[in-house]
């Protein structure tokens, strides 16, 4: 059966989740605990791309999703048709009736988009009835994981470009329309100058840029003729793709057409684009030819499977490239396909009103969850980032500020500065949005400012020095005690 896109992307996205979220929801309802309050944290376990940081993105989309999270009649009607392994309906009529008319009513705090974040820090904290807190796990991870991954990749590429404009141009290589749109939005937060994705430009207000394809030059069979006709048709986008037949000849053709444009009073050629071959050598040749012909303002634009590593290499080779068009390796986060974000239960309200703090154990210490209602306090000194402490939200951070290293709990370090910042900010209270709508311009500025405040040792692309992040002593001691108790119980069993 063929399903049109208009049927796939409907107003209700409540079923954009994994089946087990719904079966667990039914189990909570069946056990009579669906309304018990719970706290979940969305975190990731390791900074992506073997780097020293990540850029928070997608939290604005997450709040947009939660503000309309509800199962409509068509969703419930569909769930009623799903069979279990025994052939009977998987979902009980009473459970579906319970869900009808409900919506998400939780309280949510998020890290603002564009902020620097590090492993194990909550990007989203959800406090809601356990049934709904569980139901939103998969969509929240989907929205935040990919966006954060792409924003981080974009920031790394932009850093390698060292002030040169970077154009995101990967829609044709993206994982579908939605992947392309999400990535264009996140890449803008990470610092790219524009996108080739016109729909992203329309939906998110991003600048859009583009040149032309090889097919345009192939159609005319001649560089000069193709460039001349293109300039006549699109005078506001005279960047010519010069490597369809021969790059050196293509640049010469661009110069010839440029002279014609000048003579007609149409201004200079905006750029020449190189999309194959030895980009360092060809860009040096192109720059020399343009300068010799009096076209010093014409930019050399390069593309062809670029990423932060290749851009760095080309700069070391003396490449004369002014603008970088980055597609496949940005839009797909080429060398790391997933962030690996997780969503873990930190606290459950008991019938007596107190909190119980569950913990997940693992033979891999990095996978042991942090029990509690976690907050993150960021410490600054003289405009520079000093370190972060993950603390218990009920107790507050310890004074003086101190933390235990996450990788080595035996090591404790102090944090002192002239300013502190609460990383998680209120976004929803009892299901109502309270924070300002996501502002992509502000998010982009926040990304640039946070990166400028980060130590160059941590900011560098390869072998970064880890940024200081640790557990507050109260949270640290609780975690150790719960690990010991859980292991003792498992051993006794």
Image (cartoon, rainbow, N blue to C red):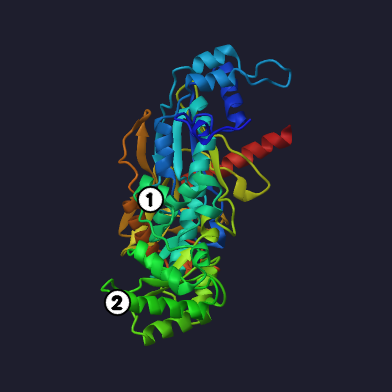
Residue 146 seen anywhere in this rendered image of the structure: yes
Q: Nearer the viewer, residue 492 or 262?
A: 262
Residue 56 seen anywhere in this rendered image of the structure: no
Horizontal side of residue 175 vs 283, given as left or right: right
Which residue is drawn at the image coordinates 43% and 35% (left, top)? 65
Residue at which label 2 appears:
262
Q: Is residue 345 above or below residue 330?
A: above
Crowd class of label 2 (few under 14; some 14 to 19; many from 20; radius 10 Å): few
Q: Is residue 449 above or below residue 145?
A: below
On-image quarter of the N terminus: top right
Q: Indicate which disc residue 201 carries.
A: 1
Which residue is drawn at the image coordinates 48% and 63% (left, top)? 216
Q: Residue 103: which quarter of the image? A: top left
Q: Secondary structure at mark 2?
A: helix
- The Cα atoms of the two marked residues, 2 and 1, are separated by 31 Å
On-image quarter of the C terminus: top right
Measured from the top left, where is residue 137 in percent x and y? 53, 35
Q: Residue 257: which quarter of the image? A: bottom left
Q: How many marks?
A: 2
Q: Is residue 255 above or below residue 40?
A: below
Which residue is drawn at the image coordinates 44% and 74% (left, top)? 224
Measured from the top left, where is residue 415 in percent x and y? 40, 58
Extreme residue toward the left, this view: 265
Q: Are marks 2 and 1 in contact (CB under 8 Å)?
A: no
Horizontal side of residue 339 vs 452, given as left or right: right
């Amino acid at each position: 059966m063929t399903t049109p896109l208009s049927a796939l992307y409907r107003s209700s996205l409540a079923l954009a989740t994994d089946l087990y979220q719904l079966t667990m929801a039914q189990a909570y309802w069946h056990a009579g605990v669906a309304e018990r309050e719970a706290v979940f944290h969305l975190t990731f376990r390791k900074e992506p791309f073997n780097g020293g940081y990540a850029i928070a993105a997608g939290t604005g989309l997450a709040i947009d999703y939660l503000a309309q999270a509800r199962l409509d009649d068509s969703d419930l009607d569909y769930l009623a048709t799903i069979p279990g392994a025994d052939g009977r309906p998987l979902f009980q009529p009473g459970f579906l009736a319970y869900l009808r008319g409900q919506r998400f009513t939780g309280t949510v705090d998020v890290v603002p988009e564009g902020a620097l974040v590090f492993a194990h820090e909550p990007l989203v904290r959800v406090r809601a009835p356990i049934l709904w807190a569980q139901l939103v796990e998969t969509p929240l991870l989907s929205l935040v994981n990919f966006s954060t991954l792409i924003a981080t990749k974009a920031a790394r590429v932009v850093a390698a470009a060292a002030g040169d404009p970077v154009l995101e141009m990967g829609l044709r290589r993206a994982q579908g329309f939605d992947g392309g749109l999400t990535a264009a939005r996140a890449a803008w937060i990470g610092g790219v100058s524009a996108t080739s994705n016109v729909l992203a430009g329309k939906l998110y207000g991003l600048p859009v840029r583009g040149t032309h394809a090889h097919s345009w030059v192939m159609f005319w069979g001649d560089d000069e003729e193709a460039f001349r006709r293109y300039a006549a048709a699109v005078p506001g986008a005279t960047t010519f793709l010069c490597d369809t037949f021969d790059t050196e000849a293509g640049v010469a053709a661009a110069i010839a057409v440029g002279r014609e444009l000048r003579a007609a009073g149409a201004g200079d050629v905006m750029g020449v684009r190189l999309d194959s071959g030895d980009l360092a050598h060809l860009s040096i040749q192109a720059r020399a030819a343009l300068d010799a012909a009096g076209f010093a303002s014409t930019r050399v634009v390069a593309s062809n499977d670029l990423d932060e590593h290749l851009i760095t290499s080309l700069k070391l080779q003396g490449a004369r490239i002014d603008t970088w068009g980055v597609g496949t390796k940005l839009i797909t986060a080429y060398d790391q396909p997933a962030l690996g974000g997780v969503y873990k239960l930190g606290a459950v309200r008991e019938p007596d009103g107190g909190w119980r703090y569950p913990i997940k154990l693992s033979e891999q210490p990095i996978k042991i969850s942090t029990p509690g209602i976690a907050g993150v306090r960021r410490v600054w000194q003289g405009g520079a980032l000093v370190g972060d402490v993950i603390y218990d939200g009920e107790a507050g951070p310890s004074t003086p500020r101190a933390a235990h290293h996450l990788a080595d709990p035996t090591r404790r370090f102090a944090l002192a500065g002239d300013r502190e910042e609460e990383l998680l900010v209120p976004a929803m209270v009892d299901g109502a949005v309270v924070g300002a709508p996501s502002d992509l311009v502000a998010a982009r500025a926040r990304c640039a400012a946070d990166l400028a405040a980060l130590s160059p040792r941590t900011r560098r692309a390869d072998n970064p020095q880890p940024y200081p992040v640790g557990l507050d002593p109260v949270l640290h001691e609780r975690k150790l005690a719960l690990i010991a108790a859980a292991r003792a119980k498992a051993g006794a069993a």
